[in-house]
Image (spheres, rainbow, N blue to C red):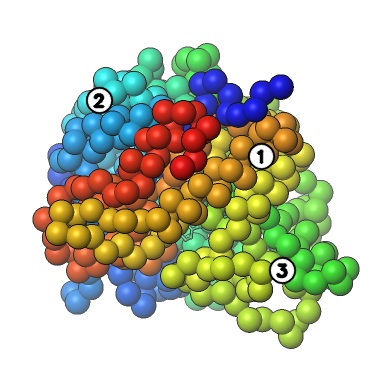
Amino acid sequence: MNKGFPQGFLWGGATAANQCEGAYDVDGRGLANVDVVPIGEERFPIIAGQRKMFDFEEGYFYPAKESIDMYHHYKEDIALFGEMGFKTYRLSIAWSRIFPKGDELEPNEKGLEFYEKLFKECHKHGIEPLVTITHFDCPMHLIEEYGGWRNRKMLEFYERLCRTLFMRYKGLVKYWLTFNEINMILHAPFMGAGLYFEEGENQEQVKYQAAHHELVASAIATKVAHEIDPENKVGCMLAAGQYYPNTAHPRDYWAALQEDRENYFFIDVQARGEYPNYAKKKWERLGIDVEMSEEDLALLRDYTVDFISFSYYSSRVASGDPEVNEKTEGNIFASIKNPYLEASEWGWQIDPLGLRITLNAIWDRYQKPMFIVENGLGAIDTPDENGYVEDDYRIDYLRQHIAAMRDAIVEDGVELLGYTTWGCIDLVSAGTGEMKKRYGFIYVDRDNEGKGTLTRSKKKSFHWYKQVIATNGQDLG
Ligand code: P53
């Protein structure tokens, strides 16, 4: 009986272009939605598509402009990942480096070169890249000219991006994710789909139409990826975290099931190839009419994903009782507080068993290989004069989650390809825009105002994770 992680398990870490690269206007890169979301109170209305900010405005700080400048530090950073023994590194492509406006016919060679060098650097260190094609980013020109993913024209632009990437990086990349946290479109539609809502518009209608376009685009990407290289493996990506009923009251269980469906809806389509009946019924009830062709439905049916990836930070709680509305803070997914769990400094509740539960729920639903592509603890770190951080809290969080994942594999028999921790090097928070919400094994000297030397240093967790990987998860310290 196998007592541990399978041979070849893909240990590593994850980042997203806009949260670490910086160099937002270097080498021909075009402006993207992720550039124009500032830190501060207005961030949330902007990423939710309620407040319009299509360009930089006076008096705001935009953390993604420079971020941790990985664009110019990638060799050093990948060497550190290599030193930890990473088998894989999940990163995302900045669409507007490849197609600065989004609707060009020819790609920007400088952008293509950057990622080619980066992928080669990974392989030099024995690291297999895992590439998110779109991690919340969309060229601003596509938003201003076409309205983002509400427009069917996006299918064409996205397909061109995918073809370009699959052709150019054939042999360098074989693991691809089409859309980061595709369900985020419902919660942060400007970030998830470049959607800004006009007065009086039916927002649910727009969101689901955009979701349909992304789902078909994802199916086309899967088709094209397999045509260009049968070695390619394409995954979907869900912001996961199972819902628990607030009490044993049947209406709370029903509420939890409904909430889960709102998220699984996307994966039901990408993994099973058709729209679930519960969604069609919901649309009927809400008067939502999603335009789709027979050809779209055939694409969804014929090109389902090879594996299912997801992020997991916490479980969630649902109630059917209208009076229960005490919400946890700090997360885009507002959820009722779970009294049995501790929370992070940002109010995200910590639930390792919830990861095992989520792994089992997804496995039971789809029976496709899974990949945990984000997990971790955002915390305030206090470095000493050498930039060393004694981050035992982070080690504890990760240790417990890795143990839960091992239980799911060893005791429950789920199939898991790998595990990449979120923000393996400190980077800008997607939710808040802060630098001080850190996830990394590697500390980066930069603060919320953009001050700092950008010097990288190893935290205690760096050495710990290195040992975890070296022993293939046997020694969790
Ligand atoms: P941060 C919440 C809010 C925004 C993005 O989040 C999120 C979530 C979590 O469900 O999703 C992912 O940086 C996302 C990453 C992000 C990470 O969670 O707000 O894929 O881009 O950085 C962590 O702490």
Does residue 192 appear left or right of residue 432 in this picture? right
Residue 46 vs 452, above or below: the answer is below
Q: Residue shown at 38%/63% (left/top)?
A: 379
Observer able to see residue 243: yes
Residue under numbered circle 3? 318
Cα separation between marks 3 and 2:
45 Å
Pick whichever of labels 3 and 2 is earlier in the sequence: 2
Q: Residue shown at 15%/54% (left/top)?
A: 386
Pick whichever of labels 1 and 3 is earlier in the sequence: 3
Q: Quadrant of the N terminus?
A: top right
Residue under numbered circle 2? 121
Q: Residue shown at 49%/35% (left/top)?
A: 475
Give the SS element for disc 2: helix
Residue 454 image point, x, y percent? 15, 52
Residue farthest toward the bottom in the current orientation of the protein = 323
- The image quarter containing residue 406 is top right
Cα separation between marks 2 and 1:
34 Å
- The image quarter containing residue 341 is bottom right
Residue under numbered circle 1? 407
Say which amino acid is labelled 3: Ala
Cα separation between marks 1 and 3:
26 Å
- Ligand 1's quadrant: bottom left
Residue 33 image point, x, y percent? 34, 56
Give the SS element for disc 3: strand
Viewer-side label of 2, 1? 1
State whether label 3 is within 8 Å of ligand 1. no
Does residue 365 appear left or right of residue 67 in this picture? right
Say which amino acid is labelled 1: Asp
- The image quarter containing residue 284 is bottom right
Q: Estimate how packed mark 2 is, as few (under 14), some (14 to 19) or many (20 or more) residues with alpha carbons within 10 Å.
A: some
Foreground of the two, 295 or 379: 379
Pick whichever of labels 2 and 1 is earlier in the sequence: 2
